[in-house]
Image: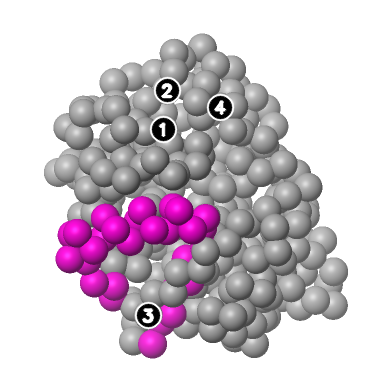
Amino acid sequence: MTESLPAVSVTAVGVAALRAYESRRPDRLFDDPYAAAFHAAGSALLPVAPGETPQGGLGAVFARQVAIRTRFYDDYLLAAGCSQVVVLAAGLDARAFRLAWPPGLRMFELDLPEVLAFKDEVLAAQGAEPSCERVVVPADLRGDWADALRTAGFDASVPTAWLAEGLLVYLSREDAEAMLSTVTELSAPGSRVSFEHRSAETRDGLLARAKATPGAERVTRLWHGGLGGTAPEWLRGHGWEPVVVSHADLAAEYDRPGDETLDGFVTAEYQSSTLR
């Protein structure tokens, strides 16, 4: 099933493994009933036993990161108040199935066609049914994906909640700016966007730690940094009003240990193109 998946899919399978681990905890921050199935189906890419627990080091860092960011983004999307959600590089995200959405909500999932095909095959085997109107949009975010989104029924005249979870670090600065420029062009006032915020210093510290971890090169070689620590400034300059939430504050709120290699998240509301 995994033969045609791109190299970056190892990260999606890894995230599924960590979501499955979090979902087994009695004090879990969320429940993803499909994560274990995604991990099992993609085990050829990431041969980790389904019940294995991240033990210290980088594995524990990523486990904390995925647990906190998944819960944060769950809350962000549910509170956004938008009737339209777009998940960029959706990977093995199962929010269309595992969260309780208000009537009429439409969720667009963008990713490479082979990733979406793999995902849908696993979900079908699980008998999963979406709790909203789910629309899959095969597209490469490094190219022109706006037309594909519009063709799929996206309405740029209504506020949209955009999510770019675990994405920008895999993009060059040029590609990250191009993607967010497209998001801006497609956003009506009142739209929202959220993604991870990491300073260059924190990113470099995490990268150094990762490079010292055997096997981590499969992931770190894909990191390109995105906007680094300048994301809030970029957003302000393009009509958005950003707010940064620290990982430490969320860890305290969720009663989880913090980590100095994790900065936090930026959430922004689109005001007007006249601010650009």
Name the residue located 36 percent from the left edge and 42 percent from the top edge: 2
Structural crowding at the residue carrying mark 4, measured as other residues with C-alpha within 10 Å and reported as few (<14), some (14–19) or many (≥20): some
- Amino acid type of disc 3? Glu
The kind of residue on which mark 1 rests is Phe
Do the numbered discs 4 and 2 sit on residues whose CB atoms are within 8 Å?
no
| Of the two numbered discs 3 and 2 in the rendering, the one whose residue sits closer to the viewer | 3
Which of pointers 3 and 2 lies earlier in the amino acid sequence?
2
x, y percent for residue 125: 19, 59
Tell which tag, 1 or 3, sits nearer the viewer.
3
Residue 113 falls within the magenta-colored stretch: yes
Comes first in the chain, label 4 or label 2: 2
Distance from disc 1 to disc 3, alpha carbons, whole Å, reads: 31 Å
x and y percentages locating residue 163 in the rendered image:
53, 61
Q: Describe residue 16's horizontal placement relative to residue 211 as left or right.
A: left
Image quadrant in which the C terminus is located: bottom right
- Measure the C-alpha gap from mark 4 to mark 1: 13 Å
Q: Where residue 248 appears, x then y in whole percent?
A: 47, 39
Looking at the picture, does residue 129 appear above or below residue 13?
below
Query: For mark 2, what is the residue?
Result: 58
Whether label 2 touches label 1, CB < 8 Å: yes
What whole-number distance in Å separates the C-alpha atoms at marks 3 and 2? 37 Å
> Which of pointers 4 and 3 lies earlier in the amino acid sequence?
3
Which residue was labeled with disc 1? 62
What span is colored magenta in the figure? 104-131
Q: CA distance from mark 4 to mark 2?
A: 12 Å
**Kind of residue at disc 4:** Thr
Residue bearing mark 3: 133
**CA separation, marks 4 and 3?**
35 Å
Question: Number of labelled discs?
Answer: 4
Mark with earlier residue (4, 1) = 1
